[in-house]
Amino acid sequence: MNENKLLEIVTQYFEEKIFDNHKINSLKTHSKLKSYKINPIIVKYLSKILDDDFTPIGIAKALYYPRVLGTSINTSFGTRIQNMFVELKLAEGSLIKGMDIEFIDKIDNRKKWCQLKSGPNTINSEDVSPLLKKFATVANLARTNKIDLNNSDLILGVLYGEETQLSQHYRKINQTYPVIIGTDFWHRITGFPNFYDKLVVRLDKMIFSLDTDDFFKQGYMALSEEIESSDLFCFE
C-alpha cells in the first residue's frame, strides 16, 4: 500500500472510529444521568462556578463537560489506535502478557514487541517499575524459549509528541528499553519516514471540516432535563 492511500485510510479511521464514535457515545451514554456517580456537594459548587447558580443546566455542565471533553475520548484513544494497527495489518495483537502489539520494524527489519502509550506525559512515577518488570519478564521468557530478542526489540511506543517532550518517567524506562515517540514510531510501523507529520496535517484539515451537529449542546441539554425531573436534586 502506498503512503497516500495509507494516509487516507488512517485519516478516515480517526474520523469514523474515534471522532464519530465520540459523538455517538456522548449522546447515547454521557447524556444519561445513570452513567454518573454523583458527589452532591461538588456538583453544587461546580454548578455555581459554571452557571452562577444551582440549576439543572449547571449540574449537567458540571457532569458532562469533563466526561465528554476529557475522560471518554482520552481513555479510548490508545485502544482505538491499537485496534487500527491490527486491522490494517501494520501489526499483530501480542500474545505475550504486558505487550499490546508485535510488528516488524521497517527501519531495522527486526520484530518488535511493543506496549503503546498515547502521549509523552501519560505515565506517572508509580508506573515505571511495573512497566520495567513487564519488559524484563518478556525478555526472560524469550531467552528461556530461545527467541532471538534483545532489549532494543522491546519498545514503548508513544503515539504523539517529540522526544524532547518525554517526561522523566519515560526517560527512566528509556535507559533500559527504547521509548519510541511520534515521527520515529510511525516511521517504524508504517515504513514511511514522514508519515506522522503528513498525518497531522491531514487530521487538522479533516477536523476543521467536521460537522459537529451541535452534539455537545444536545447532550448536556438532554442531561439537564433528566436532572430537573430527578429526585436526587431539589432546586427550590
Image (spheres, rainbow, N blue to C red):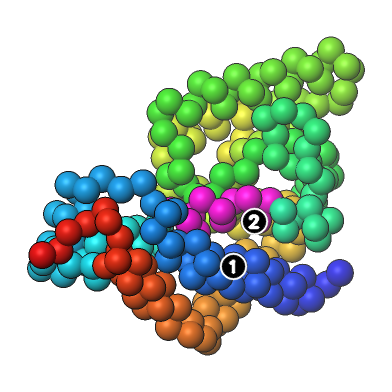
Q: Which residues are magenta?
A: 71-82
Instruction: Residue at 16%, 55% (x, y): give it.
Output: 44
Q: Amino acid at mark 2?
A: Arg
- Front residue of 78/211: it is 211
- Local SS, label 2: helix
Mark 1 lies on residue: 21
Mark 2 lies on residue: 80
Q: Quadrant of the C terminus?
A: bottom left
Residue 111 located left or right of residue 25:
right
Residue 32 located left or right of residue 63:
right
Indicate the position of residue 156 as horizontal and vertical percent values.
62, 38
Mark 2 near mark 1, Cβ–Cβ under 8 Å? yes
Residue 228 magenta-highlighted: no
Q: Is residue 95 above or below residue 162?
A: above
Residue 101 visible? The answer is: yes
Predominant secondary structure, magenta span: helix
